[in-house]
Each structure stands twice: as C-alpha cells, then as structure tokens.
Amino acid sequence: MTGPRHRQGGSSGLPEQRAIGRHPLFAPTANLAIRGMGLAMRLALLIYLARYLGIDAVGQFGLIQGAAGLTPVMLGWGVTYFLGREIVGLPRLEAGRRVRDRLILTLFSLAVAGAACGALIFAGLVTSPGPLPVIAAILALEAFAFDLHIALISVGKPLAANFLLLIRSGAWVVPAALLGIAFPALRTLDFVLLCWLAALAANVAGLWIVLRGWPLAAILRSPLDAGWIGRRIRGGWLIYLNDLALVGMTYLDRYIVNAKLDLGAAGVFVLHWSIANALHVLVSAAIVQVSLPALVTAWRDGGVESWRRALTSMAARVLVAAVVLASLVWAAALVGLPWLLGPATPINGPLLGLMLIAMIIRLLADAVNYGLYSLGRDRALAIINIGGGVASVALSLWLIGAFGLTGTALAMIATALLLLTSRIVALARHRQPDAAIAETTT
C-alpha cells in the first residue's frame, strides 16, 4: 500500500506545478521579482562603489552605465520596434533570420560608431571614462543583448529574457563586491568593469542554452534580407526619434552634470537618481505595464465609459502606490544610507525628495501615456515624447547651471509635468471611438 500511495502523491505534484506555471499571475510576479532583484543589486553596487572607491567612482561608473543604456537605442534606428512585433508567431527559422539580420545591422553600426569614437579620442576631443577596450566590449555586448532581449520576449520567452537580464545587469555585483571587500587590491573600477564583462559573456552562454533547440546553423546560412532592413529604417524614423527622446530623458542628465559641475557631482546625482528611479521601475512594472490589456479590452468591449473607468482606476492605484513607496524609500535612504556609506558620502534629503516627487509625476504621466497607447494614438504619443526629450535637455542645461544639483531634480519635475499635461491634452482631444480608429488605420 505504501508504494501506490507514494506514486499517487508524486504524480499529483507534477500537474500542480504545471498549474502554478500556467497561473496568469505567475509570469508577471516572476518578472517583477527578477526586476526587483536586479534593482537591489545595482543599488548595492553603487553603495559599494561609494563606500570603498569614493563618490567620483560612482560618477565614473554612472557615465559608463549611461553609455551602455544609450548605445543600443542610438544604434537601433527604430528597427527593434518592428522586429519585436513581426516575429511574434513566426516559425523559428523565419524569426531567427529576422533577428540575425537585426544583429548584422547592429554589428555594422557598432563598427562605424567605434571608428568615429576612436577618431574623436585620438584627436583629444573625447576622453574615455575608463579602460577603452573593456568599455568598448561592454557597450557592444550590451547592444547585442538588448536586441536579443526584445526578441526573446516576442517569441514567448519572457522569463528567460528577464533571467538573462538579471545575469548581465545585477547578478555579477555580488562576487564583484565581495571580492573587493575581501581583497583590497581588487577595489578598483577596472575590476568592477571586468566582472560586468564576465557577466555579459555568461549571458551569451545562457543564450546558447535557451536557443539550443533552434535551427541556428540554418539561420546563419540563410541570405541577408537587406531590403527588409532598409524598409524598416526608412519607415521607423519617428519611432527612432521617440526612442532617442525616451532614453535621453533617462541618461543625458548625468553627462550635463559632469560637464557643468564635476565628476563628484555626477556621482551624487547618479546615486540619488538610482534610488528614485527604483520607485519608477517597480511601480511601472507592478501596475502600469500590466494594465495595458485591461485598457485595450475596456475600450474595445465596453466603450468610452468603461475605458475611462479603467484608466482612472489605474492612475489612482499608481498614485497611492507611488506616494506610499516614495515615502518609505525616502525615510529608509535617509536613515540607512549614512550608516552604509559612512559620513563622507553626501546624502541630500531635499534632493532625493524632489527626485521622488518627479518620479511620482512621471508615473502618472506614464499611466496617461498607456491610455494614449491603448487608443492607438502612436503619432501623438511619439511627438509628445520627442518634445519632452528636447525640453528635458534644455531644462537641465538651464536649471543645473542656475541651481546646481538641485536643478537636476527641478528639471525632472518640470519635464514630468510637461509630459503629463501634454498627454492629458492629447487624451482629452481624442474621446470618440471613430477618431481612434481613424488614426490607428492611417
């Protein structure tokens, strides 16, 4: 009797595990957990750098991190936007060929950009923030990893994509920091960058495991579809400008701070911005991004009133969650960071508070942005983002010059208010279903 009962218990566990994996909340919860771990590790890295290498090292790393965020978008030409949509549901060979063509374009763009940057460095017009060969390898591998991350999500592997993102963006922080603490000779930015590069190599190995069932040899042998690349570049200029604006609003401030103030001020900015940005990432991943299907369904099935209730409900949840979490983050940072970093590292409570306010407004603006997206207002959405990107740079140049580091937070608040107001106006001008359908089909 023991044997059959044991087999019965064992066989009942497997369907239960499969049921958990199929639960609609499993993938969003797992993705949120992975993103949360990555954020925690990146914040831990900045704390390690500030405590053991100094605030200038935080600024130096922040400039390299910003370049890693800017490079994939600057060299993307808007093609990834179309790639992510087109490969959904395609056979593996055809989807793999599209991704391969995208990577060839990235390789060519990296070669041209590398030659241009090398010429500028040789001429003395640009200074590398660290060891040039290591930084160049990091930027190249991050560009490829970005393209493949989007592709993995589109072919139905979001958990694999986010797990690989965790490997290259956060998991390497633990050994880098522990080895640096244990062996003072390794407390250098060069060693940190080498650990980052090793994580990117591990990411490549992980990709090989994830894609081992794909016909990789046939994909590599297939002819290049240069016509597809050309069409996507020509048709994606507005998307490309939109992507540049969004990534510029995220990363250009640190370069303006470094140019107008100094590397130490850039370090202070990066430390405080990273804490505030964690609020944006978590609330966006937990509430804003997962609300899109409900908005689209409400508009399609319930009409204007149902859609408006869904959008209002999402915005209310975003506001409550953001205010509560921002308060907790601000208090925890003021209490915990001086203890972790030591008295030599500046923790500016008003600066962090203003940045958190900017992130709360930005989250509300993002909620309205998803409202526009659910209506198919792609052109209005892109134009507003491009205007916001230009305004963000202009406001940062003006306010940082006038108010120093406080000006960075004021520029963030002003940009977020501009985006929120513009998106509300665009949404108010677009209430009739017939108008939405007309714009979507043009």
Image (cartoon, rainbow, N blue to C red):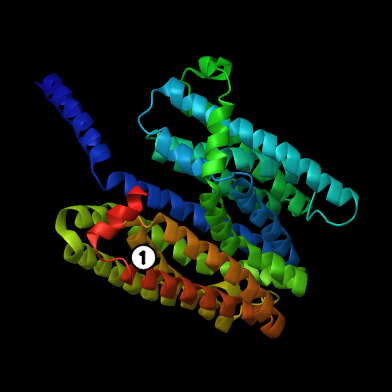
Residue in front for this viewpoint, 139 or 298:
298
- Can residue 144 be seen at all in this image of the molecule? yes
**Residue 311 found in image quarter:** bottom left
Total marks placed: 1
- Can residue 178 be seen at all in this image of the molecule? no
Question: Seen from this angle, which residue lies furthest left?
Answer: 1
Give residue 294's position: percent from left, percent from top.
Answer: 24, 55
The residue carrying pointer 1 sits among few (fewer than 14), some (14 to 19) or many (20 or more) residues within 10 Å by Cα, namely many
Q: Report the residue marked by disc 1.
A: 367
**Residue 360 found in image quarter:** bottom left
Give residue 46's position: percent from left, percent from top.
Answer: 63, 61
Residue 81 sits above or below residue 371 on the image: above
- Position of the N terminus, as image quadrant, is top left
Residue in front for this viewpoint, 199 or 137:
137
SS category of the residue bearing label 1: helix
Give residue 420's position: percent from left, percent from top.
Answer: 42, 72
Residue 41 sits above or below residue 367 on the image: above
Residue in front for this viewpoint, 178 or 198:
198
Is residue 366 shown left or right of residue 216? left
Q: Amino acid at mark 1?
A: Ala
Q: Residue at x 70, y 71 (%)?
A: 257
Give residue 352's position: percent from left, percent from top.
Answer: 55, 77
Residue 277 sits above or below residue 224 on the image: below
Q: Residue at x 50, y 29 (%)?
A: 98
Q: Residue at x 47, y 40 (%)?
A: 82
Question: Seen from this angle, which residue lies furthest right?
Answer: 123
Is residue 296 shown left or right of residue 167? left
